[in-house]
Amino acid sequence: MSVDYRLLPHFAASRARLEEARSALPARWRGDERPVVQDLNERWIAVREQARTHLELVRSATSTAAPDDDR
């Protein structure tokens, strides 16, 4: 099995963002051990990450778009 270490910074950044999202949850939610609540917490974290990724893609697309040429 071969490991592509070029992906390591991406993986580490992703893990850091997930941990940041988990720490943003209220302590009461994090401490609730009911499976349904834990599932809801993980879904909230996933949606937050998807929104962040989408926003980054939109920002990069709009910043790299060629300006209109009105010649």
Image (cartoon, grey):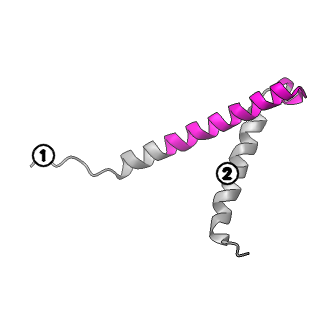
Question: Which secondary structure, mark 1?
Answer: loop
Residue range (magenta) = 28-56
Residue 24 left/right relative to 58: right
First along the sequence among labels 1 and 2: 2
On the image, which quarter does residue 39 sit in?
A: top right
**Magenta stretch encompasses residue 37:** yes
Question: In the picture, which quadrant includes the N terminus?
Answer: bottom right
Question: Closer to the camera: disc 1 or disc 2?
Answer: 2
Question: Which secondary structure, mark 2?
Answer: helix
Label 2 packing within 10 angstroms: few (<14), some (14-19), many (20+): few
Identify the residue at image location x=89%, y=28%.
Answer: 31
Locate residue 59, reporting x and y percent. 44, 44
User: In this view, which residue lies farthest toward the bottom?
Assistant: 2
- Inter-mark Cα distance, 1 to 2: 41 Å
Task: Return the residue at label 2.
Answer: 14
Does residue 52 sit above or below 66 in this rendering?
above
Identify the residue at image location x=59%, y=39%.
Answer: 50
Residue 67 left/right relative to 30: left
Magenta span: predominant SS is helix
Residue 70, which numbered label? 1
Residue 26 left/right relative to 12: right
Locate residue 13, reporting x and y percent. 67, 54
**Magenta stretch encompasses residue 15:** no
Which amino acid type is marked by label 2? Ser
* Mark count: 2
Which amino acid type is marked by label 1? Asp
